[in-house]
Amino acid sequence: MIAIPSAPAIPGVMIAGAYEQITAWLPVFETLLIAEVEAIAQALPVDEISIQWDAAFEMYASDSAGLNLFEPLSASLATLGNATPDEVDLCYHFCFGDYNGKGMPTETVAPAVRFANTLAEQLNRPADLIHIPVPGDATRDFFEPIKTLTTDDQARICLGLVHEGNGLEGNVEVMRAAHSVWPDFDVAAACGLGRRQQEKIPEILDLLKACAQTNL
């Protein structure tokens, strides 16, 4: 899997003043990112790779400060998805953020569900995987909005609810809360393993395996 930041990630965070003018920057970065995907598809076997579009800026900025950015941001994610070759698995990671193994606080899964539903309408091809991070203390209330999820049947829903600090028992408690609302899901870490200490990776992988093999 090859993870790529979405179009507003760089201008929205790194360029002064771009936050308010993000719609003007989106086509520029979309063009650059699509060219990168085309280069990847030419260099690697397309049936052996997945492209994951990381939507972090979207989770924070879509309705922030009265800017009403949801429509252009969701359209941009669809543009990137539609430009991903059909032979390549298409994935979206609706990122709530992660720092030192701890997810950033969020009260509900609703923002990710809203984007996923809109993408289901805008994509010319189905998404293969939707990854939604989950805080380690999530309860049933956090998952309630997922009942309105209307993704294509091909899309696997992967909940990033495995936190090493919770241990198996704590993670299973969150899994059961999710299962009571949306019974069919895969499990993963909240925001990947890239910022973990290398020596802890085997332990985390063992925990992920144990969670995946747990009968709810």
Image (cartoon, rainbow, N blue to C red):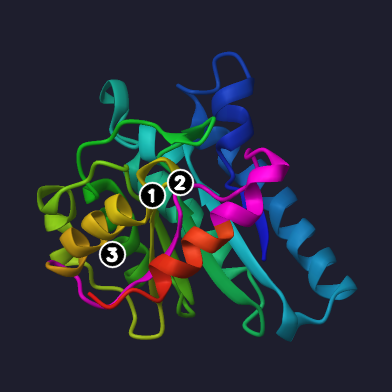
Q: Position of residue 134 (x, y in %)?
A: 33, 48
Residue at numbered disc 3: 117
In the image, 19: left or right of 9? left
Which mark lies nearer to you, 1 or 3?
Answer: 1
Task: Give the residue at x 41% y 45%.
Answer: 72
Q: Amino acid at mark 2?
A: Glu
Report the magenta residues as a range: 181-204
Q: Amino acid at mark 1?
A: Gly
107 or 63: nearer the eye?
107
**Secondary structure beneath label 1:** helix
Above or below, 20 relative to 106: above
Number of numbered discs: 3
Q: Amino acid at mark 3?
A: Asn
Separation of residues labelled 1 and 3 (CA atoms): 32 Å
Q: Position of residue 65 (x, y in %)?
A: 29, 20
Asked whether residue 56 is drawn in magenta, I would say no
In the image, 187: left or right of 196? left
99 or 89: nearer the eye?
99
Q: Position of residue 22 (x, y in %)?
A: 50, 31
Residue at numbered disc 1: 167
**Secondary structure beneath label 3:** helix
Q: Which mark is residue 125?
A: none
Q: Residues within 10 Å of mark 1 (few under 14, many from 20)?
A: few
Identity of the residue furthest to the top in this view: 16
Residue at numbered disc 2: 164
Task: Give the residue at x 71% y 44%.
Answer: 199
Q: Are marks 2 and 1 in contact (CB under 8 Å)?
A: yes
Res 15 quadrant in image: top right
